[in-house]
């Protein structure tokens, strides 16, 4: 069977980028077994021919109406699929789905009938929210960075913006490249609509949010940017942990030094 990616370099690039990031997640030890999910809104690179493609699956209920997603298309990692496999064979471990006109169901259109991620309701709720507020963000990433998840096992770090300030202060890049900081969501059942709703609420203020004792979720214009923000935050977490393992608490950059960064790079406050 012909792949949907054939002669479609723009769509192929989206899928190749997802595969590249999936490989990084595995290499970093953030993607045990089938851990983590990726969805990318690929509607912009879908042509008229794709719009006419018949479904290769039944219609599946998303679990809630998402009106802004009518007629949109996503590349999704498959449920129970491994990131390390997605890296090598993206179209066998992920699929392209179409959201139907009722905004409540999807169908798989290519290449294989791989059922999308178990966190589909959170991911699609985030995309629905982003479209609704006119955002140009297209990618959502969920992964399990060891250092960042470990930091959520300490109650004082769960207070608003405590982790943001610690991580920003470890290295100037984090202040610059993760300028909206890190939101915190108290523990909720994975795959639940409660987790989806709490995540959307935090996206008003943050591009990256921690799910307590579980993982991180980030949204960005593309999957590389979504990965880069988590990678940068993880770097800061590692600097913090390395200092602690040498027997001292790191001083961190001062509030003045971070303010100086904010002004120099015109970052949000
Ligand atoms: Zn997870």
Image (cartoon, rainbow, N blue to C red):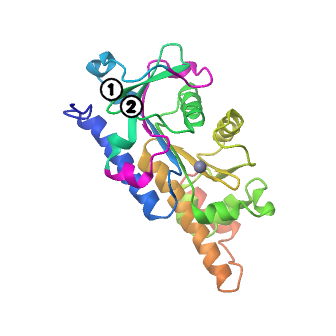
- Would you say 233 lies left or right of 52 here? right
Q: Does the magenta stretch include residue 74?
A: yes
Distance between mark 1 and mark 2 Cα atoms: 19 Å
Indicate whether 118 appears above or below 264: above
Q: In which quarter of the image is the N terminus?
A: top left
Please say if 227 is above or below 157.
Answer: above
State which mark lies toward you, 1 or 2.
Answer: 2
Task: Find numbered disc 2 in the image and state the secondary structure of the residue it sits on.
Answer: loop
- The one of 15 and 174 positioned closer to us in this rendering: 15
Q: In which quarter of the image is residue 91?
A: top left
Q: Where does label 2 land, which residue? A: 113
User: Label 2 crowding class (10 Å Cα cut-off): few <14, some 14-19, many 20+?
Assistant: many
Q: Position of residue 54 (x, y in %)?
A: 33, 17
Residue 78 location (% of width, % of height): 45, 40
Location of residue 236 by image quarter:
bottom right
First of labels 1, 2 by sequence position? 1
Q: Left or right: where does residue 36 sit relative to residue 160?
A: left
Q: What element carries label 1?
A: loop
Q: How crowded is mark 1: few (under 14 residues within 10 Å), some or many (20 or more)?
A: some
Q: Can residue 259 be seen in this view?
A: no
Who's the residue at 55% across and 35% down the image?
A: 120
Looking at this view, name the residue that lies furthest to the bottom: 247
Which residue is located at x 63 percent, y 62 percent?
A: 148
Q: Does the magenta stretch include residue 127?
A: no
> Percent position (x, y) of residue 60?
51, 22
The answer to whether residue 178 is seen in the rendering is yes
Q: Residue furthest left?
A: 7
Q: Mark 1 points at which residue?
A: 46
Q: What stretch is highlighted in magenta?
A: 60-88
| Label number found at residue 222 | none
Q: How many labels does the image show?
A: 2
- Would you say the residues marked 1 and 2 are in contact, meaning their CB atoms lie under 8 Å apart? no
């Amino acid at each position: 069977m012909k792949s949907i990616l054939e002669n479609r370099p723009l769509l192929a690039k989206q899928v190749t980028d997802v595969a590249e990031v999936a490989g990084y997640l595995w290499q970093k030890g953030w993607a045990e077994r089938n851990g983590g999910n990726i969805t990318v809104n690929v509607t912009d690179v879908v042509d008229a021919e794709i719009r006419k493609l018949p479904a290769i699956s039944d219609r599946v209920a998303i679990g809630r109406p998402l009106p802004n997603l009518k007629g949109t298309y996503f590349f999704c990692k498959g449920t129970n699929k491994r990131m390390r496999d997605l890296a090598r064979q993206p179209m066998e471990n992920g699929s392209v789905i179409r959201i139907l006109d009722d905004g409540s169901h999807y169908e798989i259109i290519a290449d294989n009938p791989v059922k999308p991620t178990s966190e589909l309701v959170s991911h699609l709720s985030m995309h629905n929210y982003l479209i609704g507020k006119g955002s140009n963000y297209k990618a959502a990433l969920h992964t399990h960075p060891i250092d960042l998840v470990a930091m959520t096992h300490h109650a004082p770090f769960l207070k608003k913006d405590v982790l943001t300030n610690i991580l920003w202060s470890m290295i100037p890049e984090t202040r610059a490249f993760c300028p909206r900081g890190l939101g915190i969501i108290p523990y909720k059942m994975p795959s639940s609509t409660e987790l989806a709703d709490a995540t959307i609420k935090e996206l008003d203020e943050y591009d990256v949010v921690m799910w307590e004792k579980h993982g991180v979720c980030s949204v960005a214009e593309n999957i590389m940017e979504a990965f880069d923000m988590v990678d940068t935050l993880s770097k800061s977490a590692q600097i913090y942990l390395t200092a602690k393992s040498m027997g001292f608490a790191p001083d961190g950059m001062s509030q003045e030094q971070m303010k100086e960064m904010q002004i120099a790079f015109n970052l949000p406050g």
